[in-house]
Image (cartoon, rainbow, N blue to C red):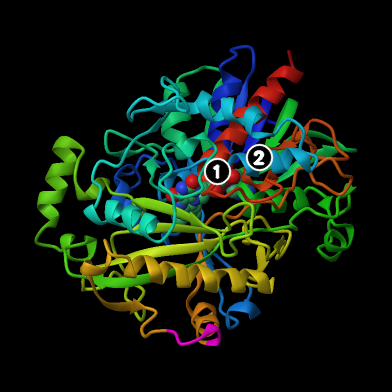
Amino acid sequence: MGREADFVIVGGGSAGCVLANRLSENSAYRVLLLEAGPPSDRFFVKMPAGASKLMGNPEVDWIHTTEPDPSANNRVGMWFAGKMLGGGSSINGMVYIRGAKHDYDGWAENGCHGWSWDEVLPYFLRSEDYRGSPAQTHAQGGPLTVSPLRMKHPLADTFVKACTEVGLRQVPDYCAGDIDGTFVNLVTQRNGQRWSSARAHIEPARNRPNLTVLTGALVDKVIMEGTTAVGVRFTHEGRDEECRASREVIVSAGSIQSAPVLLRSGIGPGAHLQSMGIAVCVDSPEVGKNLQEHASYASSRFVNIPTYNSMAGPAQLPGHLLNYLLFGKGLLTTPPVHAMAYYRSDPDLPDPDIKMQFGPFCMDRNTRKPHSRPGISVFTNVSPPKSRGEIRLRSPNPQDNPVIDHRLYGDPSDMTAMIKGLRFVDSIFEAPSMKPFIAGLNAPARPMRNDEEWADEIRAQSGIGFHAVATCRMGSDARSVVDPTLKVRGTSRLRVIDASIMPVMPSANTNAPAMMIGEKGADLILKDHR
Ligand SMILES: Cc1cc2nc3c(=O)[nH]c(=O)nc-3n(C[C@H](O)[C@H](O)[C@H](O)COP(=O)(O)OP(=O)(O)OC[C@H]3O[C@@H](n4cnc5c(N)ncnc54)[C@H](O)[C@@H]3O)c2cc1C
């Protein structure tokens, strides 16, 4: 083997960058971070509104396609995923949200000892450099800057008010474990620039002599000696290379790619490995299973005041660019989501199951491009979803994107909940504060008369929230892929540390939770090697 490090990290995304930083803080450890994509220093990554230029760009996006989804008219889905340093955090919508206390308490009650809300909150705080008004549940001085929106569209506050008019409460501090109601969200930005995991955790650590970051390094597999991980095999600059890991290999390739790395290494369901001609090292039945993703429907209305549809035309762009370059302000700092809300599709539910995100723009249903008329959208998810899917290998070749076999509405209760959620969204548009601004229907294109029409519309138009999780599920049971210390069952010196270890999706977008997993994972490793 050519190179050697104490810790080899596969994938420099939201969690992987945290790990590289925290493990290399101890100068005694040599850390090698292998990222398949390029560095994340391009202009459109740093400029928040540039995200639209990244999604679907094969240089920085894996652009996974799914199998036809029978629960959504057999449509093939496009699952974007960051392929560059920072991973999802370099391409995402920058919403900062941790989830609810009951999410993590539920994890702990179901065997993920050490992962209750009280036990994970310190790791959210450890990362954080909060730039908003003082609050107990935020921290300052950490690497990840979390800020209020620099330019909030006026209808964001109207959305929050409208939600209170139709029965939701306004949540005073949604980062304290209570998301039950409505609020204006925070973003992962510093001075109007995207603050990815790469900017937060790698840039400041880059000059450490004990940290090597290789971009353009596609990992094929973990090299196993018996059931012990001893290194990884990867290609870099057209050459096949191997690296020895004298302490541990950590797989942080995200929810769509960590399972394939394990599978190519011989860790996974035995029959599937054999069908791919891969020798079975550990027959681990749930590698790639349990896939959870937010189905998403964008309800939208035309409005009678300017929104980003009318504010971002070619004539206005030079002014916006100047404002951004000189002051780090204005439209180009804007994220897609400005406010959020949670609702119970059934009033008897103990916790909300419908998540809504308000955005001051709308898309043309036919072209899927920004509409020429000003509009607003509310993106609704069933959260957590009950539907499940799986990731499998398409071939043993790491160049081939894996098979994503998911049914967004495979569990009919998700469709039932979604319909109720979308009826509630209609009521927000009709609420006294919001109604005076509404100028017409965009999506759905006409009023829905009954549940059947809603279901048809949802099957035809739903997309995803880009929050895939749980394909390397953590648990205490023998079938789980990793144990609560994130060690891969049946192996030694091998962990998975990223969003794929979540047993159940939290009531949240998943970047801050993935970074929390990176922080806690680093702590678990460092404690073991003390
Ligand atoms: C378009 C989009 C919008 C989103 N918006 C939000 C949002 O606003 N707020 C929020 O909280 N969450 C959002 N998310 C979700 C969030 O960003 C992800 O859940 C999070 O980034 C996952 O972190 P991770 O560390 O598990 O994986 P990732 O960040 O995906 O990191 C995995 C890394 O591994 C690399 N990799 C994969 N395979 C290999 C290999 N074989 N060899 C080497 N490297 C490899 C990848 O290139 C990637 O850099 C969004 C995601 C997307 C895609």
Going 66% across and 55% down the picture, which residue do you hit? Answer: 398
Q: Amino acid at mark 2?
A: Tyr
Going 65% across and 58% down the picture, which residue do you hit? Answer: 292
From the viewer's perspective, is residue 455 above or below residue 229?
A: below
Q: Could you tell me how far apart the alpha carbons at marks 2 and 1 are, in whole angstroms?
A: 8 Å
The image position of residue 360, as x and y in percent, is 28, 59
Q: Which mark is residue 104?
A: 2
Q: Which mark is residue 99?
A: 1
Q: Which mark is residue 156?
A: none
**Magenta: predominant secondary structure element?**
loop
The image position of residue 132, as x and y in percent, is 33, 30
Mark toward the start of the polypeptide (2 vs 1): 1
Front residue of 128 and 208: 128
* Left or right: 360, with 139 as reference point: left
Q: Are marks 2 and 1 in contact (CB under 8 Å)?
A: yes
From the viewer's perspective, is residue 349 above or below residue 429?
A: above
On-image quarter of the C terminus: top right
- Badge 1 crowding class, 10 Å Cα cut-off, few under 14, some 14 to 19, many 20 or more, is many
On-image quarter of the N terminus: top right
- Residue 300 image-quadrant placement: bottom left
* Left or right: 497, with 78 as reference point: right
The image position of residue 461, as x and y in percent, is 47, 77
Label 1 SS: loop
**Is 447 part of what is drawn in magenta?**
no
Q: Is mark 2 within 8 Å of ligand 1?
A: no
* Left or right: 413, with 366 as reference point: right
The boundaries of the magenta stretch are 448-452
For residue 410, say whether it is visible.
Answer: no
